[in-house]
Amino acid sequence: MIMADFKSSLSGPAPAPGVAPPLAALWWAAKGDWGKAHAIVQDEEGAEAAWVHAYLHRAEGDLGNAGYWYRRAGRPVASGPVEAEWGRITAAFLQGEQT
């Protein structure tokens, strides 16, 4: 899937079938459903879920909690607009970047 397709899917009622949980969480975050996004990654293991978890807490303004999750993800604490971070994470996952 490419970014344009992923963004187009935001007009639908749910992420595409088979989308990995971290990407599904980013999908729900883009739809404005922080709670659903958080519920998806909260119990997921792995660096990708931790990265999304960090992003979500940063987006809500809980920077201390975000810092913990960035460390778990092995990622530096993000700066700049959260929208830009959403785009970077989503693009990395869609391109198959290993975290």
Image (cartoon, grey):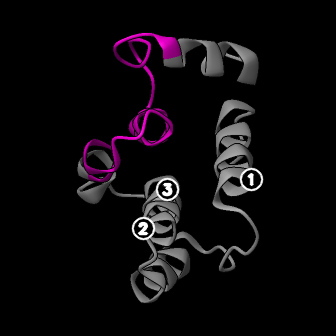
Above or below — where is 98 with respect to 90?
Answer: below
Identify the mark nearer the N-term, 1 or 2.
2
Q: Position of residue 93 (x, y in %)?
A: 64, 39
Q: Secondary structure at mark 3?
A: helix
Q: Position of residue 88 (x, y in %)?
A: 74, 49
Inspect the image, locate mark 3, and give the three-letter code of the amino acid beneath it: Val
Q: Position of residue 56 (x, y in %)?
A: 45, 60
> What residue is shown at x 33% (from left), y 41% (from top)?
33
Query: Which residue is denoted by mark 2 in the rendering?
Result: 60
Q: Nearer the viewer, mark 1 or mark 3?
A: 1
Q: Residues within 10 Å of mark 1 (few under 14, many from 20)?
A: few
Above or below — where is 67 with respect to 20?
Answer: below
State the CA–CA distance, disc 1 to disc 2: 15 Å
Pick the quarter of the image with the C terminus: bottom right
State left or right for residue 11 relative to residue 62. Answer: right
* Whether label 1 touches label 3, CB < 8 Å: no
Q: Position of residue 50 (x, y in %)?
A: 45, 63
* Residue 52, disc: 3
Inspect the image, locate mark 2, and give the three-letter code of the amino acid beneath it: Glu
Inspect the image, locate mark 1, and give the three-letter code of the amino acid beneath it: Ala
* Residue 84, disc: 1
State left or right for residue 20 relative to residue 42. Answer: right
Above or below — where is 15 with respect to 28?
Answer: above
> What residue is shown at x 53% (from left), y 82% (from top)?
71
Quadrant of the image occupied by residue 12: top left
Q: Secondary structure at mark 1?
A: helix
Pick the quarter of the image with the N terminus: top right
* Whether label 2 touches label 3, CB < 8 Å: no
Above or below — where is 10 with respect to 31?
Answer: above
Q: Secondary structure at mark 2?
A: helix
- The span shown in magenta is 11-38
State left or right for residue 26 relative to residue 77. Answer: left
